[in-house]
Image: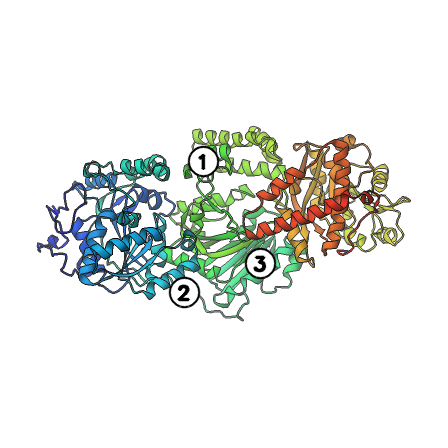
Amino acid sequence: MLLPNTVPSARRRAGTDPVPWSRHATFGKPAPSLNEPVEAEAGQWPAVILGGTHVDLMGFDDAVRVIMAGASQAGPPLAVCSANLDHIRHFGTGGRWSGTLDGRAVRWLTLIDGAPLSVQARRLTGIPWPRLAGSDLVEPILAEAEKRGHRVGFLGGTEAAQHLIRERFSAERPGLEIAGWWAPERSVIGDRKASHKLARDIAASAPDILVVGLGKPRQELWINEFGHLTGAKVLLAFGAVVDFLAGHIRRAPEWVADNGLEWAWRLMLEPKRLARRYLVDGPEAYVRLRRDSGVGFRTGSASRPLGGAAAIDVPGHAPSHAPGSFAAVGQPADVAVIVVTYNNADDIGPLIDSLRPDARTATIKVVVADNSPDHRTVEALGKHPDVMVVRTGGNLGYAGGINVAVQAAGSAAAYLILNPDLRVEAGSIAAMRQRLDLSGAGMVVPVLLDDDGSVYPSLRREPGVLRAMGDAALGSHLPGRPGWLGEMDFDAESYKYAHPVEWATGAAMLVDAGVAAAVGVWDEQFFLYSEETDYCRRVRDRGASIWFEPSARMWHERGGSGTSPQLTALMSVNRVRYAQKYLGRVQRGAFRMAVLGGEVARINKPGHSQAAFALLDRRRWNSLPAAHRGEAKPASGTVIIPAHNEAAVIARTLESLREVLDWGTVEVLVACNGCSDDTASIAARFDGVRVLEVGEASKTAALNAGDAAARSWPRLYLDADIEVTGDAVAAVLNSLADGPLLAARPAFRYDTTGASFAVRAYYRARNRIPDNLRALWGAGVYALSEDGHRRLGTFPTFTADDYYVDGLFGADEKAVLGTVPVVVRTPRSAAALLDILRRTYRGNAQQDAASGGGSGPRTLRQLLASVRGPLTAFDALVYAAFAAAGRRRASRPHALKAGWERDDTSR
């Protein structure tokens, strides 16, 4: 039987092992002294799996010998880390960084540090193994480096701590050659470009050994990705060793360490920093240690072949087409890009353009499955003849659209599924393909960025009862809570390094073709929401891993698409559908109650009451959005368009209603009020449009005249310069005819084309204020049911009719539907915007004075809450400046007598 050092603690010095075990002793050879070189090619030692992570088993002297041998050898550098319960939490089974220390660019040597691991190793092997803490190993390593003339560098700790170490070394180790001292800010370590520069700076100092004390897991992750660029032959991930060397941390007494109580000693000294590690995260890691540790030795070797560095060539097909163009569908390709669209005419072009740089170095083909009810998206794609477009014949949802596109795409090495509103940064597809190859993954997901450059938290954990309960109780609060209490991963560290994940939002996913074939089609029962959760679960069930790759970056332009009670309900219902598919009876019942509890807790917010009722009554599931083929059913009702001298835009608006007019079930009225131009004659040219002549130039008079002439319900009130699709009209009218809602509007988006920089900043900030996206006002269109209109009566003589109508209904009586967004063209100049704001605030002030209400403080709070970085802060500042100027102008005495301010810059 091979025996390691049998002392319970490794707080010793080289050459004092009472029962020395050496890998050379395996072959009956005497153990060499520390001064004797050790050839790593001959070195192998036992290794086990502790808590799901590979751990090498060796004695104290052997560890020092192997490390010092690495400092004299060529080839990939040797990286050394110590495994304790915190290491298992990060890198073991279920840990965020499980599988990341893959040894591609460095060779990893993982040593036992922690009494529970030492005990577990003895339990598995029957042999006592010592604890090899970095704080114990560093002194003999430095002593050997001084003897052999190795250059040593220190990365991590504070400049003050490093200064104390320099003073100590000048007295105690005058012969130790120091390569350099580096104390970077945490922001540097988390930034890829800054880390590359730091590694180059270190390499310029030519260290043989680099002591890295950045804290776990940051130091291991940094070494794994950038260590080979530093030029160091040995990198020691030794945590707080810099503070130990500086004397900032007191060592535990010998009897404390020997009895496995060093954790309690450190907790006593640093309770604020270590309480969570030892008292909250520690027990979970201990469960993993006992559950996921393996008997049977795996052969460990710090010299095992590792392949090349990170920059490897990914094999692919040689492009047989013009650089930057896409391959034909029938041609084999490295990547088939799959996009599902639903009225994304304005989004799809920029996405296609952003894909072309990667098409210069790889064979890429693009297939778009269009679920749109009209032809605008297909027409926009007409500018890209090398893109294949498949009309699905209805709205099949995201999953159904993916299935159609993948089938049409034909053969490819991988399928890249993208949302149509993404912009792909050049090189991202290559980075994802490289990660697919490096990690042997089945799927790779990128980092998603919002338009202000902030990282969107796209990574998720597998749904479960405890996580559902945590999300129900806390929502987005306490983002730093343990992972078992929430699905979303809010930790910024998770988005800085590549690592396996359980699932991610379906906006962007690169799937290996072999894995896609094994997993099969996407499950169309989910239609929208949870379909990616299901697909990722099936990928993992096939034994494939899912990796996050931070060097692949994609920009997600999320605008004012609004919300819908039906979509809110569908999101919760699909979570329950997922639980029913994968959880046992008791678990899925508990999961459903947890989701229901979350909806009840938010019952006062739009859509959550509908979600709660849907969870209580399964019969309501049939009324939620689902896949359908063929056009949406025609609706019935009335569209009323007040128009005052709108000859420049009325034809454009009525043209957007062409489909509605063709139904024959919706009457369209144009109420021309005080018109002195050709508005009436232009409107009369459209078959099915009734034109009303109102003598008074008053929007209120036009609205009331339209109501008096209308014959059917519900009624949709549409500004003359707003374009709306038939799908949106049908969704709004049907929601008021079939459901409990009294008022609704479609989603909208701002078109800032041609607007000044300041105007665009104002509307970006406005898009981030929740009240602006939830209210009926601001879109230039809203609708009322007959019961809703009964509450209104006639339109009062206030300026802002939509603001007034919005105030008549509670959150559960009105809704913003997730339809095709209507287009709201914004003013182009700051002066025009100020005129519109003066009118808006004047009308709001009149109504607030009459009702005693007002939303100013709430809007300010939401504006401040929207600030997440310098860009959003700038936008918020611009918004506040315009709002203040608009309110000031509206409050002037002459403003009350002002005429109707209209924006002509966007007409």
Circle 2 or circle 1, nearest the eye: 1
Q: Which mark is on residue 467? A: 1
Q: Earlier in the sequence, mark 3 or mark 2?
A: 2
Secondary structure under tag 1 reads helix
Residue 274: quadrant of the picture:
top left
**Amino acid type shown at disc 1:** Arg
Marks 2/1: CA–CA distance: 41 Å
Q: CA distance from mark 3 to mark 1?
A: 35 Å
Coloring applied to the structure? rainbow
Quadrant into which the C terminus falls: bottom right
Q: Which residue is mark 3?
A: 351
Q: How many marks?
A: 3
Nearer the observer, 139 or 352: 139
Depth check: give the residue in front, 781 or 497.
497
Q: Nearer the viewer, mark 3 or mark 2?
A: 3
Looking at marks 3 and 1 on the same chain, the residue that comes earlier in the sequence is marked by 3
Q: Please, what is the three-letter code of the amino acid marked with disc 3?
A: Leu
Instruction: Name the spot of residue 313 as percent of width and height, x first.
Output: 39, 65
Determine crowd level at label 2: few under 14, some 14-19, many 20+ residues with C-alpha closer than 10 A. Answer: few
Contact (CB < 8 A) between labels 3 and 2? no
Q: Amino acid at mark 2?
A: Pro
Q: Secondary structure at mark 3?
A: helix
Q: Which mark is residue 315?
A: 2
Mark closer to the chain start, 2 or 1: 2
Mark 2 falls on what kind of element? loop
Q: Residue at x 54, y 41 (%)?
A: 525
Task: Residue at 18% x, 57% y: name it.
Answer: 144
